[in-house]
Image (spheres, rainbow, N blue to C red):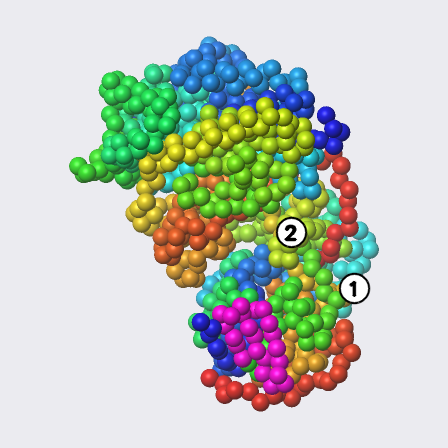
């Protein structure tokens, strides 16, 4: 490997692992930085080593794909530098800033593959900050990672394939799922069938989860509008509305979400150009078909660049690594080019499936309009929809960063991860603009909180400006 | 369709200086149009530390600072919000005997300016502020200095000016400025052309270009102070802290977040800047030394901005020496927030009277250029409305 | 109607055959299992992790994946830790309620 080549991969989910595998296969030794203690990302998250459940139990119908990815990483370990439990909190001058066990360090790179994944996309409802309300992804982590259910009588709310997957996983594991409430309708799902059929395996799985839930007596309701979680300091019930009227079901935990949102803060800090993606209703870093970002030497793969699912993430990780290799003259042989083309075609077909998912589980277009004034939008800073609307009206605000400065939305510890989507939707709606026009919250260092107790290895002191 | 406008006073830049000038001019009855490249208060005026501080300023600035103190005291009345302004006190710490001597010298020299400074020795510091770290051996307290939230205050000045009838145009970068001997013509990308006999150059870190275009180039350089903020913490510190000789400055906002400034970032381009890793590391280290109370806290966000610095760290305020009707108010070296509202009033006085009641000779643009003429008489202007 | 048997928010469904870990929550001695995150250790026998600063309302985390930052817990010695990404360690002394502030 050329002495100057130091590829670094951020994220060890399916995209990062396939990227690492591809680089190793061509003789490179990437550094792979993982915020988690064990590789696998979110979808193939591995519980702590002392847990005993089999992969079959943990991943169900995804067990084979999970095993392939997880085992691959095991074989890669001697050939990579794997830095687990390590947060990348900043990037500057060809180096990443890392935090590991309260120690800060830097990692130089010549080329960077960002496979930073995603979190749940949150559209709040009244009472969503009550203890006992979690995201769908969070509910899944509780089960997969800790063997727990988030409550003894659980309601799942929102939309997206994850909604049914998690309800199924919970019920199968012996948890009591008292209702599954989907904002999408059966008609939405039927209309999406032609697009979903490009991935018949995935479609069949979805149908299977739904049928299984029905067969096991789990109440499923479609076309709902969440009205709120009931309970003071603890969840007691979930209220919703559908065509038949208003309903309430007793429960002690709620898991909710409306599909996923990409983690793009590092791409932003690195100066990558962003574009508004209509399907994902989000600003995402631009990239070519291979995953090259607008900044030379930076490659993007997986859910972190745009929600694409685990299988596509594997393809994208491999494709980005092949691009890196081609760009550094490590792999332009016909075999690699053919493989790259094949991956791009597969990724292209994924787009159609993603459109199908959006059609089957549409983003509720009237969410912002229907959000009540008292709804807490920013849970870190306790900023309500009314605060946003009042400020926007009083100051004529049309830009999300100005709204953030004035109302504190997005200024809390989570830096807009949980509230950014909702805040932009509300601003767009109340200022009468298309969503794209309100702009986006920017990634700023540190992308997650860093402790003052962080020790530095070297600190060249410079005289500071006087005040 | 190009809009053609005319008014008494054109203002370039919607920061706290330009916006408070607009407000003051409207109260005097002049017609005003303010052109802001981005959003009012979105630059240095909106992203600074938030110190509302007289103590520590060069003596030349103290008359302005005193005047501004009066404005801040009436802030809510003026701009309709309190902007989280508190007269919490500003404590400047000494870490060495020579630092202490510098503070004592300032205490003496500034005696006539009504700041009511109190010198505190180590014992007094420990008694009154037990949360201070060990390194401080003394300090100087200005009880009525304080801090505010610049993100709220600066845009509110612009809003107040608009409410009084100023025509405030945001997202309106100016591409050309010309003068025909009597009027300025400002052109904004074929969308707007503005004619006015007076032009206030309040374009902050970018004002040097305007000055240069009127043969009054100044050696201004951009600088990028770094800010960091913690998560909300139990209140332990109401006053704003500074350190003699440099280092960091820190305050705790009413919600509990600590805002800490210090060191330098770097420019991404002409308009944007971000903190450097060196700066972040320095802030982390120096904060724990100064405020052991924060040793278990976290930084949740950092940012930077762009400030204009002249070599003597004094601003440029006053009439142009080349062009009648051109008045400058820029280059505050990172210390423009507190005096900004007073500078705005002064600029308005310069329009109306050709002179200000507050001494500003030290800030003359002439100190960087060879003066050709001093325009102290008021050129003929349009009827005030 | 609440489930009378629920001891806390989280319900352990499986993997309960792990070694015990002793810790303290709000001054009371408690047990968790090795491999529990702090969040699991606490929520398996309680219903809150912290109190949110702006309004003082109770919180119990949200995303479980280190993104929402709503599960930061305080220890008795004043340290802060993110409950969903920190494993429970024997002897941890955790606080889920705000302390009564000292008179200053």
Chain under callout 1: B
Are both tags, 2 and 1, on one chain? Answer: yes
Is B339 displayed left or right of A116 in the figure? right
- Which quadrant would residue B223 be assigned to in this image? bottom right
User: Where residue A422 sits: x, y (%)?
Assistant: 40, 45
- Which quadrant would residue C43 be assigned to in this image? top left
Helix or strand or loop: what does disc 2 sit on? loop
The verdict on residue B175 being magenta is yes
The quarter of the image holding the N terminus of chain C is top left
Q: Which residue is most to the right?
A: B98
| Magenta-tinted stretch | B174-195
Q: Which residue is mark 1?
A: B105
Mark 2 or mark 1: name the one nearer the start of the chain. 1
Query: Is residue A140 in view from this perspective?
Result: yes
Q: Nearer the viewer, residue B149 or B304?
A: B304
User: Where residue A406 sits: x, y (%)?
Assistant: 48, 56
**Residue A164: mark:** none
Q: Which residue is mark 2?
A: B268
Residue neighbourhood size for the residue with mark 2, other residues' Cα within 10 Å, grouped as few (<14), some (14–19), many (≥20): few
The verdict on residue A324 being magenta is no
Chain under callout 2: B
Q: Nearer the viewer, residue A73 or C53?
A: A73
Q: Nearer the viewer, residue B183 or A379?
A: B183
Is A197 displayed left or right of A31 in the figure? left
Q: Nearer the viewer, mark 2 or mark 1?
A: 2
Q: Which residue is most to the front?
A: A334
The residue drawn where x is 41% and y is 37% is A121
């Amino acid at each position: 490997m050329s002495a100057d080549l130091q590829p670094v991969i951020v994220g060890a989910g399916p995209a990062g692992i396939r990227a690492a595998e591809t680089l190793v296969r061509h003789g490179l030794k990437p550094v792979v930085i993982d915020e988690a203690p064990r590789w696998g990302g979110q979808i193939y998250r591995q519980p702590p080593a002392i847990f005993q459940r089999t992969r079959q139990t943990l991943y169900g119908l995804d067990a084979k794909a999970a095993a392939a990815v997880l085992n691959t990483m095991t074989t890669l370990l001697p050939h990579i530098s794997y830095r687990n439990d390590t947060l990348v909190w900043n990037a500057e001058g060809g180096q990443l800033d890392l935090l590991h066990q309260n120690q800060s360090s830097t990692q130089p790179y010549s080329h960077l593959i960002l496979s930073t994944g995603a979190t749940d996309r949150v559209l709040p409802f009244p009472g969503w900050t009550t203890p006992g309300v979690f995201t769908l992804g969070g509910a899944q982590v509780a089960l997969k990672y800790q063997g727990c259910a988030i409550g003894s009588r659980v309601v799942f709310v929102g939309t997206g394939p994850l909604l049914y997957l998690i309800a199924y996983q919970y019920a199968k594991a012996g948890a009591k799922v008292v209702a599954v409430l989907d904002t999408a309708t059966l008609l939405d799902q039927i209309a999406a069938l032609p697009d979903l059929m490009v991935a018949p395996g995935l479609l069949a799985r979805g149908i299977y989860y739904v049928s299984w839930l029905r067969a096991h007596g789990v109440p499923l309701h479609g076309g709902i509008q969440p009205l709120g979680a009931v309970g003071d300091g603890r969840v007691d019930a979930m209220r919703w509305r559908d065509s038949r009227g208003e309903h309430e079901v007793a429960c002690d935990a709620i898991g909710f979400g409306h599909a996923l949102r990409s983690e793009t803060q590092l791409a932003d800090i690195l100066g990558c150009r962003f574009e508004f993606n209509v399907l994902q209703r989000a600003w995402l870093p631009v990239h070519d078909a291979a995953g090259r970002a607008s900044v030379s030497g930076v490659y993007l793969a997986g859910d972190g660049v745009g929600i694409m699912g685990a299988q596509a993430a594997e393809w994208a990780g491999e494709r980005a690594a092949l691009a890196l290799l081609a760009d550094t003259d490590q792999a332009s042989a016909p075999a690699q080019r053919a493989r790259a083309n094949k991956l791009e075609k597969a990724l292209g077909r994924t787009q159609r499936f993603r459109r199908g998912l959006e059609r089957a589980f549409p983003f509720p277009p009237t969410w912002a309009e229907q959000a009540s004034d008292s709804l807490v939008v920013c849970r870190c800073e306790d900023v309500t929809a009314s605060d946003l609307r009042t400020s926007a009206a009083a100051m004529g605000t049309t830009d999300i960063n100005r709204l953030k400065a004035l109302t504190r939305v997005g200024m809390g510890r989570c830096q807009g991860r949980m509230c950014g989507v909702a805040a932009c939707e509300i601003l767009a709606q109340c200022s009468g603009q298309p969503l794209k026009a309100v702009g986006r919250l920017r990634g700023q260092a540190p992308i997650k909180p860093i402790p003052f107790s962080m020790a530095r290895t070297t600190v060249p002191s410079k005289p500071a400006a006087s005040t | 369709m190009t809009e053609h406008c005319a008014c008494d006073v054109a203002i370039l830049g919607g920061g706290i200086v330009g916006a408070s000038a607009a407000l003051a001019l409207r109260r005097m009855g002049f017609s005003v149009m303010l052109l802001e490249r981005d959003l009012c208060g979105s630059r240095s005026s909106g992203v600074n530390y938030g110190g509302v501080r007289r103590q520590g300023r060069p003596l030349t600035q103290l008359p302005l600072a005193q005047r501004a103190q009066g404005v801040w005291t009436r802030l809510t009345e003026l701009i309709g919000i309190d902007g989280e302004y508190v007269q919490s006190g500003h404590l400047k710490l000494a870490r060495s005997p020579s630092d202490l001597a510098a503070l004592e010298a300032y205490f003496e020299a500034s005696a006539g300016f009504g700041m009511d400074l109190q010198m505190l020795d180590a014992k007094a510091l420990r008694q009154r502020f037990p949360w201070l770290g060990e390194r401080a051996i003394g300090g100087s307290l200005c009880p009525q200095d304080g801090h505010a939230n610049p993100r709220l205050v600066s845009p509110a000045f612009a809003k107040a000016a608009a409410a009084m009838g100023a025509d405030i145009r945001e997202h309106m970068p100016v591409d050309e400025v010309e003068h025909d001997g009597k009027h300025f013509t400002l052109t904004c990308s074929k969308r707007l052309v503005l004619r006015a006999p007076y032009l206030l150059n309040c374009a902050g870190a970018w004002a040097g270009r305007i000055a240069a275009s009127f043969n009054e180039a100044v050696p201004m350089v951009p600088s990028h102070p770094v800010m960091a903020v913690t998560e909300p913490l139990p209140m332990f510190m109401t006053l704003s802290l500074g350190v003699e000789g440099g280092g960091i400055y820190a305050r705790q906002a009413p919600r509990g977040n600590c805002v800490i400034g210090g060191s330098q970032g770097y420019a991404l381009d002409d308009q944007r800047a971000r903190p450097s890793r060196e700066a972040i590391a320095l802030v982390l280290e120096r904060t724990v030394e100064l405020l052991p109370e924060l040793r278990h806290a976290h930084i949740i966000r950092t940012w930077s901005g762009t400030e204009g610095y002249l070599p003597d760290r004094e601003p440029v305020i006053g009439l142009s020496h080349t062009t009648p009707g051109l008045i400058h108010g820029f280059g505050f070296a990172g210390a423009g927030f507190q005096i900004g509202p007073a500078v705005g009033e002064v600029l308005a006085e310069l329009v109306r009277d050709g002179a200000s009641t507050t001494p500003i000779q030290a800030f003359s643009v002439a100190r960087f250029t060879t003066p050709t003429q001093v325009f102290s008489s008021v050129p003929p202007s349009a009827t005030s409305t | 109607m609440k489930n009378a048997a629920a001891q806390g928010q989280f319900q352990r469904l499986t993997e309960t055959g792990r070694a015990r870990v002793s810790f303290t929550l709000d001054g009371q001695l408690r047990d968790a299992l090795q491999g529990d995150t702090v969040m699991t250790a606490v929520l398996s026998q309680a219903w809150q992790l912290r109190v949110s600063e702006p309004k003082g309302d109770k919180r119990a985390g949200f995303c479980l994946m280190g993104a929402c930052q709503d599960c930061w817990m305080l220890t008795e010695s004043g340290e802060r830790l993110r409950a969903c990404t920190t494993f429970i360690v024997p002897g941890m002394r955790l606080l889920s309620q705000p302390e009564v502030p000292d008179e200053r």
